[in-house]
Image (tube, rainbow, N blue to C red):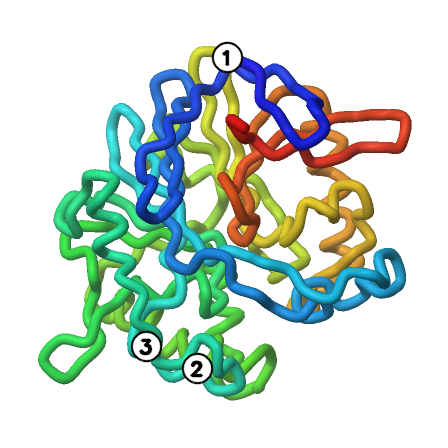
Amino acid sequence: MAAKVAGGAEFSSPAQRIPWSREVRMTAFQIGTIRIDQIVEMENVTVPAKWLLANISDFYPEIETFEINIQSFLIRTGKNTILVDSGCGDGRSRPGQPQFEGLTTGFLQKLALAGPQVDDIDLVILTHLHFDHVGWNTNWVDGAWRPTFPRARYLFSRNEYEFWGSAQWTGIGSEATRQSFRDSVQPVVDAGQADFLEALEDIRRFDPEIALLPLPGHTPYQFGIAVESMSERAVIVADALHSPLQISEPRLYNGGDMDRELALRTRQTLIRDHADTGTLLFGSHVGGSSAGCIVSGDGGPRFVEWTDA
């Protein structure tokens, strides 16, 4: 199947796109026998260009704003129904982030449009523990933050957990993320529903069709999620990629990148390993279908978004 971009360029990918929800513009992809659904919590959020890419004016001074998504991904393997990251969450206090304060997004209703109810989620895998990736881990019930998905095991890096746990007294990172650790991460640990990943290979104990890739830099222990089936491959790259422009110019960095040089090396590795392979890459904040491939050209690599247009 060929995917198209503006100008008529095409790339070949065996994955099948299923546009299943016109109402909220979400898309599903069939990767062999595995299905990946885009679950959009917030669509087309307009942000200042420097908020997303801090050094944008060094490369593209004409760009003043970006439109981004806040989104999760639903993976259905032969064994599990898996939610990858859980967005911002509703009704939260997020100091220093007024656009994410006290939200009402209807995320669980959007998730239900894809089929699963909260009781159907087997695993919640958290690529990293920033506030916009953990919010729906919990809901406010009977005066306390309690796990949203009652049957799920919540999986995340022990090192990432300990890093943000220590941030409660070291003050590293944003106050919004320190607050989300208290209301959206620690409660699932206290409820006994968390399983710490000591090593990325530990994921195989939970689902043999899932692999984790180290993507450090944005946070020290961020990882991505790869699926492969019937010679088709997709990778959820989390916040290693905030904008498709970072494929053409990987020196562009997000202001939240905790180690800019390491984040750059991570992007360079993604480009090297996935250019011209047909692998679909999914970005947590990339708009539209959220997915595309890296294609080489005379001007260097670029991200070609998957679209039926």
Q: Which residue in the protein does label 1 denote?
A: 231
Place of residue 235 in the rendered image (x, y in percent of width and height, measured from the top left): 53, 34
Place of residue 180 in the rendered image (x, y in percent of width and height, measured from the top left): 40, 75
Packing grade of label 3 (10 A; few <14, some 14-19, many >=20) is many
Place of residue 166 in the rendered image (x, y in percent of width and height, measured from the top left): 51, 78
Q: Are marks 1 and 2 in contact (CB under 8 Å)?
A: no
Left or right side of 109 for 66: right
Q: Which residue in the protein does label 3 denote?
A: 183
**Amino acid type, residue under disc 2 in the picture:** Arg
- Is the residue 15 above or below the residue 147 in the image? above
- Is residue 223 in view from this perspective? no
Packing grade of label 2 (10 A; few <14, some 14-19, many >=20) is many
Which is more toward the observer, 61 or 275?
A: 61
The residues bearing labels 3 and 1 have C-alpha atoms spaced at a distance of: 40 Å
- Is residue 298 in view from this perspective? yes
Q: Which residue in the protein does label 2 denote?
A: 94
**Which element carries disc 1, helix, strand or loop?**
loop
